Amino acid sequence: MMRALVFALLLVSSAYADDPARLIAAGKYDEAIAAGSAQNTAVGFSLAARAALTDDVSRNTPCLACLERAEGFARRAVAADPNYPEGQIDLAVSLGLKTHIEGIVVAKLSGYPEQARRAIDAALAAEPGNLWALAARGGWNLEIVGHAGTGLADLLYGATIAKGMTAFAAAFKTAPDNIVLRYQYALTLADCDSARFRDEIDDALGRAANGKADTVYERLVQTRAVALMDLIKRNDTAGFKARVKYYQGYP
């Protein structure tokens, strides 16, 4: 769920070589984890979680160990400061991505959807306009609808397409040119209903492919956006759906 939602935060610059955000932006994820966790603060633990998450979504195969590591750091960030929104977002994203690997049944039994929703709500309570919390809310709603269907998603979780689209629209008002946000929006819509949202997917991928990339992960995002656009142009529906699942971290 909500793949890549927290990573545009990595554009923060610093004069220090061991700054975790700079290390993540440079693709040095293990070093970023070490530097972030060494800070022993909510911010540091959150950056360590984000490094582990970025490591996972950058790999060619899903990495459950990466996600469990990210979840652990996210929970430490939340414990250190429940009102620090990025820690809550990292937790929600970790749980969403674990769902892709472990499956819906395990996720339901483990309470991942409810835990993710509480984390997103906590992030938005702390910072109502937080870009990535809004995007996480959008992704949470759309992904549950995509897996459970419209009626069951609303009945069990109160998740709807309208709520998802509204949350993403609010995020775009804050950062209309953010390529990671556009890319994630395209993946989320494609995983939910690629035929219904074809126009929105085309637009989002085009914006991601042609925007400004400043980090290692953002350059990877652009490469993947171009690959998806090529599959659409060739009318390779099966290939497109398979690639979306691959980029979303499904086994």
Image (cartoon, rainbow, N blue to C red):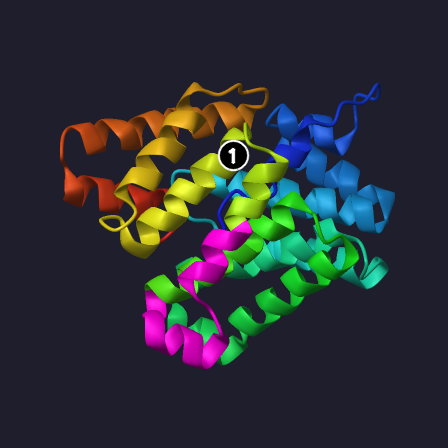
**Is residue 212 at all visible to an observer of this figure?**
yes
183 or 26: which is nearer to us?
183
**Is residue 248 at all visible to an observer of this figure?**
no
Q: Residue furthest left?
A: 235
Disc 1 crowd, CA 10 A, few/some/many (<14, 14-19, 20+)? many
199 or 236: which is nearer to us?
199
Q: Is residue 17 magenta?
A: no
Q: Residue at x 48, y 21 (%)?
A: 211
Q: Which residues are magenta?
A: 147-167
In the image, residue 5 sits, relative to residue 89, either above or below, namely above
**Does residue 161 appear left or right of residue 42 in this picture?**
left
In the image, residue 89 sits, relative to residue 221, either above or below, namely below
Q: Is residue 162 magenta?
A: yes
In the image, residue 162 sits, relative to residue 229, either above or below, namely below
Which residue matches tag 1?
Answer: 180
Counting labels gives 1
Q: Residue at x 44, y 28 (%)?
A: 208
Q: Residue 3 placed where, x, y %?
A: 48, 47
User: At numbered mark 1, what does the secondary structure look like: helix, strand or loop?
Assistant: helix
Q: Residue at x 67, y 48 (%)?
A: 49
Identified by mark 1, the residue type is Val
